[in-house]
Amino acid sequence: MTGVPSFRFAITSLRTKAGSAMHHLCGTVKRGSLSNCGPPSPGVTPVGLLTKEIPMTIQDLAKKFTDLCRAGKFEEAGAKFWSDDIVSAEPMTGDMALLKGRKAVEGKGKWWAENHTVHSCKVEGPYVNGDQFILRFEMDFTPKGKQRMTMAEFGLYTVKNGKISEERFYSNGGA
Amino acid sequence: MTGVPSFRFAITSLRTKAGSAMHHLCGTVKRGSLSNCGPPSPGVTPVGLLTKEIPMTIQDLAKKFTDLCRAGKFEEAGAKFWSDDIVSAEPMTGDMALLKGRKAVEGKGKWWAENHTVHSCKVEGPYVNGDQFILRFEMDFTPKGKQRMTMAEFGLYTVKNGKISEERFYSNGGA
């Protein structure tokens, strides 16, 4: 009863993939011709503008953000899609557990980049519901002066006005 | 910079695993002897009572709930850990997209069970942050009168007063 039932809705989603695909095409049509996009598909939530004229759905934004993460372009992903008042919540207590604002969150990322060697990073997703999506990260990395390790983690992203307003990470504590 | 930085916190979590383990032991000490539990470990959030006297952390609850799901005991998992006013949100629009209350959500599960044959279900997790945890479901199933299929989905669970107050599912639309 917990999680299983909704698989039937995924089946419904399959039927609406053509509609979703149509919205992906919106990113390629010439600017200003919004009529080319047609009406939103069921379950496709417009979240903002890709440019001044081209609408972007949560699916569009999540896919573009995920593609950048998958390519290892995390800085670019944040620069393009984070809100300036982005909130970043880590699965722990302490000073860095909850950061607010682009500068603070970029600082955390900078610290990470300078103190870890990433050998590979697999990204699964995006998995969408309403104005949120989830990604699964699996990373092979070596912390400075420590042993190489592989860890998995989930990221929950909340989108408002076409930008990611919050990222919240979930860990299994290395279990 | 989006999701990657928090891997370093997962490393910290490794150091606190002994603490978490201590809290798992709390479920086995004789009732009423809370002192056996000692102080909470960093990042371990007490969320309610396992019994009248035994405290349960989010990690405890998430693990017990996940173990039942992993064993295919979804009804038992819901019966034990859902709040009576559980809210269940599916990744789609429509009448069944947002259900409130145990009866409504159990009805959805009953509908699913009666209309799908489940061949296998893998459950990954729990991945915890604060009062929430995420599970990844991968199910091999056959909808009545349709073709057998495999689909993945994420479930985000929010815990309040020792019960799951909300479950929110995220889908990739079968992509």
Image (spheres, coloured by chain):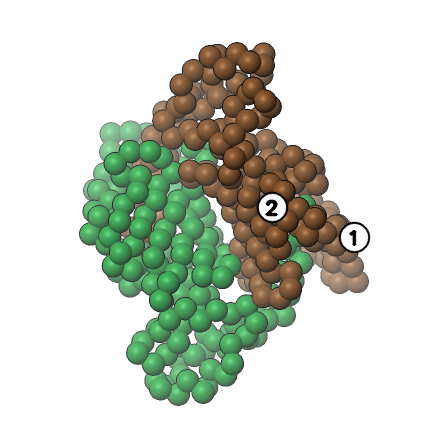
Chain colours: A brown, B green
Residue at 58% across, 50% down: A87
Please determine whether, in this image, residue A37 is positioned above or below residue B9: above
Judging by the rendered image, the residue that carries numbered circle 1 is: A114
Please, what is the three-letter code of the amino acid marked with disc 1?
Glu
Judging by the rendered image, the residue that carries numbered circle 2 is: A85
- Quadrant that contains the C terminus of chain A: bottom right
Q: Are marks 2 and 1 in contact (CB under 8 Å)?
A: no
Please, what is the three-letter code of the amino acid marked with disc 2?
Asp
Please determine whether, in this image, residue A33 is positioned above or below residue A125: above
Residue A71, percent from left and from top: 67, 35
First in sequence: mark 2 vs mark 1: 2
Of residues B67 and A2, the one drawn nearer to the viewer in this rendering: A2
Which mark, residue B50?
none
Residue at 24% across, 29% down: B145
Of residues A75 and B12, the one drawn nearer to the viewer in this rendering: A75
Q: What SS does tag 1 mark? A: helix
Characterize the local packing of mark 2: few (<14), some (14-19) or many (20 or more) Cα atoms within 10 angstroms. some
Please determine whether, in this image, residue A73 is positioned above or below residue A119: above
Please determine whether, in this image, residue A124 is positioned above or below residue A19: below
Characterize the local packing of mark 1: few (<14), some (14-19) or many (20 or more) Cα atoms within 10 angstroms. few
Q: Chain of mark 2?
A: A
